[in-house]
Image: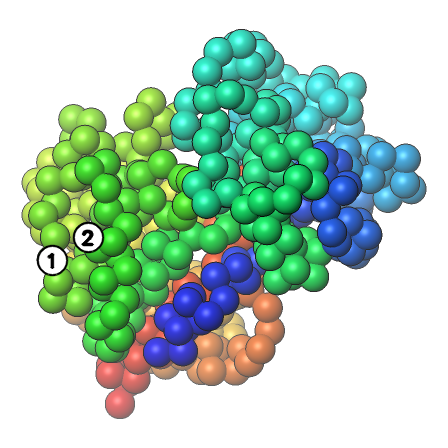
């Protein structure tokens, strides 16, 4: 499978560039090769209203980062005006990574006031930083407790650059040079994340009846430690990557004991990390798939279903992702099918803000579990996927800001088309 081969051939460019992360490098590492290209990227991606990033509340974090990076440039002044408007409205933060810390940290740099309490940020600056926050080291500065893996700090270019502190030769500089070169200057927020990409692609393809190379299972097994599996180098192991990797191995007839998940158990559900702010429905769906059956967990997932029939999640902006994950684990849900059928667009697509390839693939997956005849809706969705062509995929996944794991999205589309063809033939 070409998508899986690309993980080995090019580990750097499977994820889309991040306005937030690129802005941090512009502001904090102007010495890194590609600085002018990163500035141009920020200028080219500003919206007409002065913001950067996704719609609505998803504009706040990337706009703060870009404004701080561009300083006195006219684009920064327009961005500052947009920020003042955003911050005077009732503030609803998206559940992106460390948003409750990033917003006050960048607002402080810009002299802006926010309704967010800065005291947790200030307290963390006075004590050793928990490992799960190393991914956001750029808002704290270099810390003696932080360690790099093969020169990489928590799979983050910005965190690595801050810990490096300057253009000192070595593995960290080599990593930064390679990442920025892969996108011509701008960088993703988390890279490389080979286990995350491999596991999600394998699960998408194998669960739809498509084959993957056997060699992939060896790479996944090698990533496990006694704590489970981590998405990429320098990241801590977590329940989501551990569960999905376990499920991928089982689908490839290479199962591994699932006891490593037990350390993430919290009563009826699993936490991605210790002391997490909000639980993840998709993580718990992946855990259920890994362990096979758990009555309490199944009940918890059903309790998390919204009245409209869908689920929401902390790792993705779209309810179609969370709903696909949960219905995959529960092997269907009639209310979810009804919601999907009622939200299909006239062109056959589905999407939170607009019809997208990715969300349409998830909708087809949800419908594939239906016992009713949904072939017409699936066929219309498949036609939309086939006509998408080479258009870019809008960022919908949560890191520090929104991003697209392009290879995973392509795999979900291939799986959805296969499922639709099986039903509609």
Describe residue 325's horizontal placement relative to residue 333 as left or right. Answer: right
Residue 146 falls left or right of residue 215: right
Any mark on residue 246, and which? Answer: 2
**Image quadrant for the C terminus?**
bottom left
Earlier-in-chain disc, 1 versus 2: 2
Q: Is residue 216 above or below residue 124?
A: below
At 51% from the left and 43% from the top, the residue drawn is 151
Q: Nearer the viewer, residue 415 or 330?
A: 415
Question: At which x and y percent is residue 133?
Answer: 47, 28
Q: Residues within 10 Å of mark 1 (few under 14, many from 20)?
A: some
Judged left or right of residue 46, residue 193 is: left
Task: Determine the image quadrant of residue 375.
Answer: bottom left
Helix, strand or loop at disc 1? loop
Query: Splitting the image into 4 quarters, where does residue 141 fall?
Result: top right
> Can residue 373 be seen?
no
Can the viewer see residue 365 in this picture? Answer: yes
Q: Nearer the viewer, residue 197 or 398?
A: 197
Q: Is residue 258 left or right of residue 212?
A: left
Is 299 or 162 nearer to us in this picture? 162
Q: Residue at x 50, y 51 (%)?
A: 191
Q: What percent of the width, then of the height, locates residue 399?
A: 50, 43
- Per the image, the residue denoted by label 1 is 255
Residue 92: which quarter of the image? top right
């Amino acid at each position: 499978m070409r998508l899986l081969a690309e993980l080995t051939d090019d580990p750097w460019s499977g994820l889309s560039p991040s306005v937030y992360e690129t802005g941090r490098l512009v502001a904090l590492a102007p010495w890194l090769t590609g600085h002018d290209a990163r500035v141009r990227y920020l200028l080219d991606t500003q919206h007409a209203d002065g913001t950067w990033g996704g719609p609505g509340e998803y504009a706040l974090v990337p706009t703060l980062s870009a404004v701080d990076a561009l300083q006195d440039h006219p684009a920064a002044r327009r961005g500052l005006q947009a920020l003042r408007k955003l911050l005077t409205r009732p503030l609803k933060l998206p559940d992106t990574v460390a948003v409750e810390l990033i917003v006050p940290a960048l607002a402080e740099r810009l002299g802006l006031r926010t309704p967010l309490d800065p005291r947790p940020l200030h307290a963390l600056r006075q004590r050793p930083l928990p490992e799960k926050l190393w991914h956001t080291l750029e808002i704290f500065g270099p810390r003696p407790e932080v360690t790099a893996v093969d020169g990489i700090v928590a799979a983050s270019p910005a965190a690595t650059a801050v810990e490096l502190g300057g253009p000192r030769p070595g593995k960290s500089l080599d990593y930064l040079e390679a990442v920025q070169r892969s996108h011509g200057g701008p960088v993703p927020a988390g890279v490389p994340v080979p286990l995350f990409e491999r596991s999600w692609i394998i699960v998408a393809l194998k669960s739809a009846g498509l084959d993957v190379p056997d060699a992939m299972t060896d790479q996944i097994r090698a990533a496990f430690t006694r704590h489970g599996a981590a998405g990429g180098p320098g990241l801590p192991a977590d329940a989501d990557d551990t569960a999905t990797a376990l499920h991928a191995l089982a689908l490839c007839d290479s199962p591994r004991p699932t006891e490593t998940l037990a350390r993430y158990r919290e009563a009826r559900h699993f936490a991605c990390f210790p002391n997490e702010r909000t639980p993840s429905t998709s993580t718990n769906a992946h855990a259920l798939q890994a362990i096979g059956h758990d009555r309490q967990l199944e009940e918890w997932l059903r309790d998390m279903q919204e009245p409209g029939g869908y689920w929401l999640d902390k790792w993705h902006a779209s309810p179609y992702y969370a709903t696909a994950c949960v219905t995959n684990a529960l092997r269907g849900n009639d209310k979810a099918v009804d919601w999907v059928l009622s939200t299909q667009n006239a062109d056959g697509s589905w999407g939170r803000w607009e019809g997208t390839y990715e969300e349409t693939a998830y909708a087809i997956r949800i419908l594939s579990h239906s016992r009713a005849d949904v072939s017409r809706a699936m066929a219309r969705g498949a036609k939309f996927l086939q006509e998408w062509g080479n258009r870019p995929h809008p960022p919908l996944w949560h890191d520090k800001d929104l991003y697209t794991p392009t290879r995973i999205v392509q795999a979900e589309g291939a799986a959805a088309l296969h499922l639709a063809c099986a039903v509609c033939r």
